[in-house]
Image (cartoon, rainbow, N blue to C red):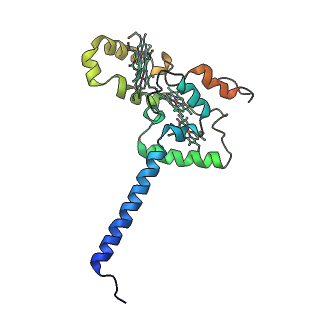
Amino acid sequence: MKRFDTKTWIIVAVVVLLIVVGATAGVANKTSSSGFCSSCHAYEKISWDHGDHQEVSCISCHTKGSFNDKINGIRKVMLTTMGKVDPHRDHLPSYKDEIINNCKGCHMTDEIRQERPVFTARHDEYLQHYSNCMGCHDPGHKRSYQTKRFVGSGKTNIP
Ligand code: HEC
Ligand code: HEC
Ligand code: HEC
Ligand code: HEC
């Protein structure tokens, strides 16, 4: 029986590598999709459907960099599957100050600064007094829908 020569092995190795890379990228894409987020955050999905940002994916506002997201994601899957946290019902931590750069990435771009100098100058001023956008805006989620997740759970409103 003829053994594989070096060339064949290289081809096999390249094919295997392509499959592995492709599958990893596929999983990364899927776990960044809004549908995946909604499987654990149903009320956030409903409140997002009724908010000003239905066109903006969950991850665009909530990312803290793809590396952090994946590590935190694994932690969250563990917390959920081990029953430590019920993301549909429990109070979740909130990191408003950390996601502000994602807001700025869309709303305070250099282009917008040039086109709308008054708007951006006023906002620079606002941000001297507020540590994040959420002191004045309620973006992403319509509160009245979001807070429904606490109905019947004996828990009060979102902090
Ligand atoms: C397997 C279930 C699960 C999935 C899927 C999931 N989460 Fe979570 N999420 C959790 C849990 C559990 C917590 C609470 C974590 C904690 O207590 O530290 C949480 C917390 C959060 C928080 C508040 C705390 C923080 O880290 O900012 C946000 C925002 C959030 N998730 C957004 C998302 C987004 C966006 C996606 C999709 C990319 C997503 N989640 C997918 C279970 C999940
Ligand atoms: C336009 C930006 C934006 C989009 C899009 C968005 N969110 Fe949020 N989300 C926020 C803000 C702002 C908060 C409040 C600050 C915080 O807790 O991080 C929040 C809070 C949350 C929380 C914490 C809830 C709590 O108990 O305070 C979760 C979980 C969450 N969002 C999940 C999602 C999911 C899932 C989607 C997509 C279906 C989504 N978000 C889309 C801006 C957004
Ligand atoms: C991926 C880009 C993107 C991100 C991230 C994003 N937005 Fe937006 N935002 C939009 C778009 C698109 C609209 C709707 C079109 C418009 O009116 O400019 C909008 C609309 C708004 C409006 C006007 C709503 C109204 O009354 O019509 C406010 C305020 C706002 N966003 C604040 C925020 C804040 C605060 C954050 C961060 C939590 C954020 N956005 C994150 C793209 C984004
Ligand atoms: C002190 C309160 C305050 C803070 C903090 C604040 N805003 Fe605003 N924002 C306003 C007010 C008031 C308006 C409407 C009048 C104006 O343009 O100033 C507005 C309007 C907007 C609009 C709509 C502009 C338009 O006319 O299309 C967007 C988008 C927006 N803000 C984004 C943000 C983002 C992103 C942040 C955080 C980086 C932020 N805001 C922080 C008060 C605030």
Percent position of residue 26, x then y: 43, 51
- The vertical placement of 144 against 37, above or below, is above
- The vertical placement of 50 against 31, above or below, is above
- Taking the spot 56% from the left edge, 31% from the top edge, the residue there is 45
Residue lying farthest front? 1
- Taking the spot 66% from the left edge, 39% from the top edge, the residue there is 86
- Taking the spot 27% from the left edge, 13% from the top edge, the residue there is 117
Residue 109, visible in the rendered structure: yes
Q: Is residue 5 left or right of residue 95?
A: left
Residue lying farthest bottom? 1
- The vertical placement of 88 against 147, above or below, is below
Q: Is residue 139 left or right of residue 46?
A: left
Percent position of residue 107, x then y: 36, 22
Quarter of the image that includes the C terminus:
top right
Query: Looking at the image, in which quadrant does ligand 4 appear?
Result: top left
- Taking the spot 51% from the left edge, 22% from the top edge, the residue there is 51
Relative to the observer, which residue lies in front, 119 or 128?
119
Residue 158, visible in the rendered structure: no
Percent position of residue 62, x then y: 47, 34
How many marks on residues?
Answer: 0
Relative to the observer, which residue lies in front, 46 or 79?
46
Quarter of the image that includes the N terminus:
bottom left
Quadrant of res 131: top left
Residue lying farthest left? 114
Q: Is residue 132 left or right of residue 41?
A: left
Percent position of residue 80, x then y: 63, 45
